[in-house]
Image (tube, grey):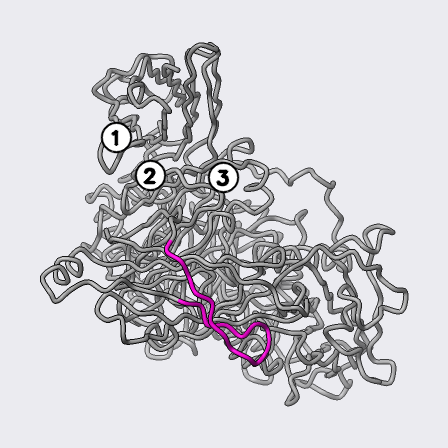
């Protein structure tokens, strides 16, 4: 038996109003039902909510068996649902905690506790009210919009910390509310070589019982960031104790969310940390010889995404980034490079790179009908000194590829690949930001042409005076050699290997040189890697007027480390809260298709909104996964269907508390937006179930405004169902399990004759064979004249188009009057009407019809579907 609850145990849930509905589903497999039918008897399960009422006195509230609108995704099971309602505590600022105790079908005498059986913790509920209180000029401590209700003011720092209110308008009651904490960061002493100026300043202490939990984006090594959560929640929250320095911290309060975002510059850095008493402390580092001021933006809002968006708005303003026109989104040009399937040599070929091995690997992909358009030649193609036994000690000597592996140079490699495989459009190369892992060799061709600076740690780098010319020359050489994209790695070495006395000049010089050369020669076809360093993020990737590059969003994909795979998805989905506010395309890294976790990673990459690229070993491919992550367009290209950037749905649930993670994205044209929800198992043990309300996906405001229902399609179970705005989606996940559900808005058409009433509810899902098939939709229009309803659907790729139809008169279901593709009638054999478990889903075999009708790139990929009403 599986038991599933919403609000979930082991998490914190915010509800609007003064009551919360608790829903519990008990799922029984058909084998359990059969066994119990042969046993002594079936005992009716019972369930009660055991809660603290917002205080220390625990009590139980019975649950009643009820009908609940639930779409179950995963194993087929029989379900008994329970419901009850809990009232908010009398004190408005008090969280409520609950768990479940129940009896199952085996015995009515044995009480089971959900926390023990599921190895989880209590659920914590926060009640959010509309607040009419005025904001006092003194920011009264009892005012829920006052920051000092939740954090004490900074203690006396001898004028080191000043606080100012930031206002977009004069209406101070508008949410969110923002403050800037300004911190003076001491200068570096002129005599110091590697010790920057350093300042610590306490920003505030959490007010007892006002903070429920926290989530921070913390440093992971020098190159990356990762999510970190408070160990305890609710009244057990024990202060701010992140394991490492933070680039952002969010606190869930009894009334909303407070976000702290420190702003870094190329020559000065700000982080956050906790002290022994759980206070929030700013840590400033200054690589210049003058006093500088650092700023931490602090925002209070109703939810975390609003707070983070507002924090970045002010980060851009404070950093001097020009503000964009309100309400006018920045144009997102079509980018064939981003949409194309890519292949990288790193986990495929490793460091043993030669022309023959690269060409053979590409040949192998094409022989398996994996028609990649971009090839990334990763680490170890360059001309280096030293030995292969010490790759991190080697240094770069020459622009040209090493002669042992690539005797004809890069030009010969590119020509061979493109002459054999005309579909290859781009060949990219990897390089380190300083040249190679250990910089530049003092004895090579590069050293003879450009001025080098030797650091005391022995590393040689191109000097500030020559670095812009150096990058321009290098990228010009690559471009002339046929290279049309780059992966600039090891960018953290600017912070790690350059001493403070040099960093103040070299750091901004290198960032500018790389940015200018990348845009000049490759446009947006550049990947910024190992660069999740605040100085880099706020310098090269904040301003939307600068070039938009791919940014690696987390540490690497590690194919041979089993525990890393769920964490990789969890970390990327949480890091996306930060990176989605930058001027980047988040890159969730490569993966392998023939791998125990291959489809798991594939689904996450499809949802991510970033590039999709594989690193399969030669001869080891899963073509079924390739078909799920790409679709052919009308020119024959393998297109990755990319939705908008994906993020976690629940930022305050920790990795250890969560058995699944839910990732959300959006696809489709502006007037028909479809929600994609990916659910991924994080548990390496038994099967787990999870449930969430549809309102969490579409938003309570939209759900209230639209009323009605949504059409929900499960990619893995291939089932569709109408789910009411107050309904739920439930998933059952095995180890490494995942599913993606598409939530589509409903269009309702009704007859115009008063004597006969009929209606049909319609929705579009996209290409059903692809994980992110909703992203194939470019246009949707519904029209009705009272007797016929028409749907116009534009596509960017070929496949099996799925849409949903639900008639009030079942006799009309499946009666398609006409389907046209590019104005040509589609024969009936290419139309499939779903029956049984597939009832409601109608499929148009667009790719088969396109080929049978002999359509080509000159024709429009647009369908018209006519149905009776």
How many C-alpha atoms fall within 10 Å of the one at disc 3: few (<14), some, or many (≥20)?
few
Give the number of the mark in front: 3 or 1: 1
Q: In the rendered image, is residue 582 in sight?
A: yes
The residue under label 2 is 720
Of 609 and 20, nearer the camera is 20
Instruction: Residue 244 in the image: state x and y as whole percent.
Output: 56, 80
Quarter of the picture holding the C terminus: top left
Residue 52 located within the stretch drawn in magenta: yes
Q: Earlier in the sequence, mark 1 or mark 2?
A: 2
Of 445 and 616, nearer the camera is 616
Residue 46 located within the stretch drawn in magenta: no
Give the number of the mark in front: 3 or 2: 2
Of 22 and 648, nearer the camera is 22
Instruction: Residue 33 in the image: state x and y as whole percent.
Output: 17, 58
Does the residue at mark 1 contact the one at mark 2 (Cβ under 8 Å)?
A: yes
Question: How many labels sit on residues?
Answer: 3
| Bounds of the magenta segment | 48-65
Does the residue at mark 3 contact the one at mark 1 (Cβ under 8 Å)?
A: no
Q: Residue furthest right?
A: 137
Q: Quadrant of residue 788?
A: top left
Label of residue 427 in the image: none
Q: Residue furthest left?
A: 38
Report the Cα–Cα distance between label 3 and label 2.
Answer: 32 Å
Q: In the rendered image, is residue 283 in sight?
A: no
Q: Quadrant of residue 577?
A: bottom right
The answer to whether 264 is drawn above or below residue 187 in the figure is: above
Q: Residue at x 57, y 75 (%)?
A: 234
Q: Quadrant of residue 28?
A: bottom left
The residue under label 3 is 335
Quarter of the picture holding the N terminus: bottom left
The residue under label 1 is 834
Q: Residue at x 42, y 76 (%)?
A: 392
């Amino acid at each position: 038996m599986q038991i599933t609850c919403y609000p979930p145990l082991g998490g914190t849930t915010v509800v609007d109003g003064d009551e919360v509905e608790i829903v519990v589903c008990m799922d029984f497999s058909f084998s359990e039902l059969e066994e119990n039918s042969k046993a002594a008897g079936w005992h009716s399960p019972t369930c009660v909510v055991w809660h603290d009422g917002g205080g220390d006195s625990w009590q139980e509230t019975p649950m009643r068996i009820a009908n609940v609108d639930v779409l179950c995704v995963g194993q087929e099971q029989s379900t008994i649902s329970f419901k009850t309602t809990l009232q908010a505590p009398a004190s408005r600022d008090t969280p409520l905690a609950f768990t479940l105790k129940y009896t199952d079908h085996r015995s009515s005498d044995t009480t089971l506790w959900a926390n023990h059986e599921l190895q989880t913790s209590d659920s914590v509920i926060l009640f959010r009210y509309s607040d009419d209180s005025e904001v006092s000029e003194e920011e009264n401590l009892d005012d829920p919009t006052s920051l000092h209700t939740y954090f004490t003011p900074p203690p006396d720092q001898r004028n080191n910390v000043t606080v100012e209110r930031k206002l977009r308008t004069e209406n101070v009651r508008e949410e969110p509310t923002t403050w800037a904490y300004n911190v003076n960061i001491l200068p570096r002493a002129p005599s110091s070589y590697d010790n920057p100026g350093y300042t610590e300043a306490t920003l505030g202490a959490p007010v007892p019982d006002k903070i429920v939990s926290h989530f921070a984006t913390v440093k992971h090594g020098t190159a990356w960031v990762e999510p970190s959560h408070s160990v305890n929640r609710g009244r057990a929250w024990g202060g701010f104790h992140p394991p490492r320095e933070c680039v952002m911290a969010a606190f869930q309060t009894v009334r909303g969310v407070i976000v702290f975002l420190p702003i870094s510059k190329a020559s000065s850095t700000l982080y956050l940390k906790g002290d022994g008493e759980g206070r929030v402390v700013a840590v400033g580092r200054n690589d210049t010889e003058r006093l500088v001021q650092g700023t931490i933006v602090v925002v209070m809002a109703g939810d975390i995404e609003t707070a983070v968006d507002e924090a970045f708005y002010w980060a851009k303003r404070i950093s001097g980034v020009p503000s964009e026109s309100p309400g006018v989104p920045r144009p997102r040009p079509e980018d064939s490079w981003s949409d194309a399937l890519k292949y990288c040599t790193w986990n495929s070929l490793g460091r043993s790179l030669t022309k023959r091995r690269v060409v053979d690997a590409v040949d192998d992909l094409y022989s398996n009908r994996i028609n990649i358009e971009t090839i990334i030649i990763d680490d170890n193609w360059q001309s280096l000194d030293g030995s292969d036994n010490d790759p991190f000690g080697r240094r770069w000597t020459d622009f040209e590829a090493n002669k042992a592996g690539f005797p004809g140079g890069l030009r010969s490699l590119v020509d061979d690949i493109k002459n054999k495989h005309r579909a290859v459009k781009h060949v990219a190369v990897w390089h380190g930001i300083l040249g190679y892992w250990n910089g530049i060799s003092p004895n090579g061709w590069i050293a003879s042409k450009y001025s080098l600076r030797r650091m005391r740690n022995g590393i040689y780098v191109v000097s500030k005076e020559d670095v812009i010319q150096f990058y321009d020359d290098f990228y010009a050489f690559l471009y002339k050699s046929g290279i049309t994209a780059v992966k600039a790695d090891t960018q953290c070495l600017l912070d790690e290997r350059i001493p403070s006395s040099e960093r103040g000049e070299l750091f901004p010089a290198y960032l500018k040189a790389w940015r200018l050369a990348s845009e000049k020669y490759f446009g947006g076809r550049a990947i910024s890697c190992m660069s999740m360093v605040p100085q880099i993020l706020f310098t090269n990737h904040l301003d939307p007027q600068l070039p938009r590059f791919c940014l690696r969003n987390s540490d690497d994909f590690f194919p041979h480390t089993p525990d890393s795979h769920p964490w990789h998805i969890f970390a990327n989905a949480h890091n996306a809260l930060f990176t989605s506010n930058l001027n980047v395309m988040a890159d969730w890294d490569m993966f392998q298709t023939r791998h125990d976790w291959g489809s798991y990673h594939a689904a996450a990459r499809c949802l991510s909104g970033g590039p999709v690229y594989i690193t399969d070993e030669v001869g080891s491919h899963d073509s079924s996964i390739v078909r799920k992550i790409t679709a052919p367009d009308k020119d024959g290209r393998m297109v990755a269907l990319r939705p908008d950037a994906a993020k976690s749905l629940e930022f305050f649930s920790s990795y250890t508390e969560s058995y699944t993670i839910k990732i959300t994205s959006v696809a489709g044209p502006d007037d028909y937006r479809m929600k994609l929800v990916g659910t991924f198992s994080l548990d390496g043990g038994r099967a787990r179930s999870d449930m969430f309300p549809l309102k969490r996906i579409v938003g309570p405001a939209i759900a209230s405004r639209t009323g009605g229902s949504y059409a929900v399609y499960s990619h893995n179970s291939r089932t569709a169902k109408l789910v009411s705005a107050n309904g739920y989606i439930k998933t059952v996940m095995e180890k490494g399990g995942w599913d993606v559900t598409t939530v589509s808005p409903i269009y309702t058409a009704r007859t115009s004759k008063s004597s006969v009433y009929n209606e049909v509810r319609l929705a579009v899902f996209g290409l059903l064979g692809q994980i992110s098939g909703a992203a194939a939709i470019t246009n949707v229009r519904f029209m009705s004249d009272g007797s016929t309803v028409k749907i116009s659907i534009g596509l960017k790729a070929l496949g099996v188009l799925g849409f949903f139809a639900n008639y009030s008169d079942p006799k009309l279901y499946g009666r398609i009057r006409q389907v046209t593709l590019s104005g040509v009638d589609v024969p009936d054999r290419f139309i499939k009407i779903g029956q049984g478990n597939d009832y409601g889903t109608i499929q148009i075999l667009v790719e088969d019809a396109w080929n049978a009708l002999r359509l080509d790139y000159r024709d429009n990929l647009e369908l018209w579907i006519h149905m009776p009403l």
